[in-house]
Image (cartoon, rainbow, N blue to C red):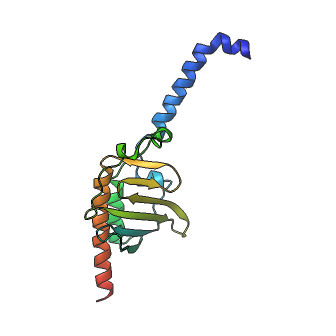
Amino acid sequence: MKAFWEAHRKALSWGLAALLVLWALWYARPLDIYDLIGGETPGYLQISVFPQSEFPKVIHGNLTLTAGKPEMEAVLERLEEIRFHRNPLEVVLRFLPQGTRVTEVDPEKDYRIQFFAYGEEGRFLRGLSFDLTYWRDYRSLPLYVLHGQERGRALGAYLWELYQEEWHSFYR
């Protein structure tokens, strides 16, 4: 085996490097919400929205949206617009100072959001969260989104408004 390695070291090294590059490209490919939840359309979504405007007081709203309802279709449309990426260098990036990776937090604009998707029969599909500046998939490493904080803010504002409308219509 050692003689084989010595004779073909350069070719094997290049082959291994090529496989590593191909894996990194595949791993970092853009994913939509359906790729993250296994290609299924969720039967219902449970969403918690935490506006940070009243921090440290914890205010939140919970939404349960079922398939076929216009509210769920609107939320899914907004999630479909977002392209998620996984970073193959996340293991290295964990050791960088946080200031190089985090943008500024504005309590008047920022939200924490938790999504839980369930299939038609109530089977858990996937959890996804947005936490002030970053997106995370509950089964893997962080997700990267181009202009992720702005997209999270816009989605948080929309979901908070949707919760407010639902809450007011429920108590009228």
Total labels: the figure holds 0
95 vs 71: above or below: above
User: Can you name the residue that lies furthest to the top here?
Assistant: 7
Query: Percent position (x, y) of residue 114?
Result: 42, 64
Residue shown at 35% from the left, 70% from the top: 56
19 or 44: nearer the viewer = 19
165 vs 29: above or below: below
User: Can you name the residue that lies furthest to the bottom here?
Assistant: 172
Residue shown at 45% from the left, 59% from the top: 128
Could you say which quadrant of the image residue 164 lies in? bottom left
Horizontal side, residue 8 vs residue 141: left or right:
right
Horizontal side, residue 124 vs residue 76: left or right:
right
94 or 156: nearer the viewer = 94
Query: Percent position (x, y) of residue 32?
Result: 40, 51
Q: Specify whether residue 17 is in view.
A: yes
Query: Percent position (x, y) of residue 153?
Result: 29, 59
Q: Specify whether residue 84 is in view.
A: no
Query: Percent position (x, y) of residue 139?
Result: 53, 54
171 vs 145: above or below: below
User: Can you name the residue that lies furthest to the left here?
Assistant: 108
143 vs 88: above or below: below
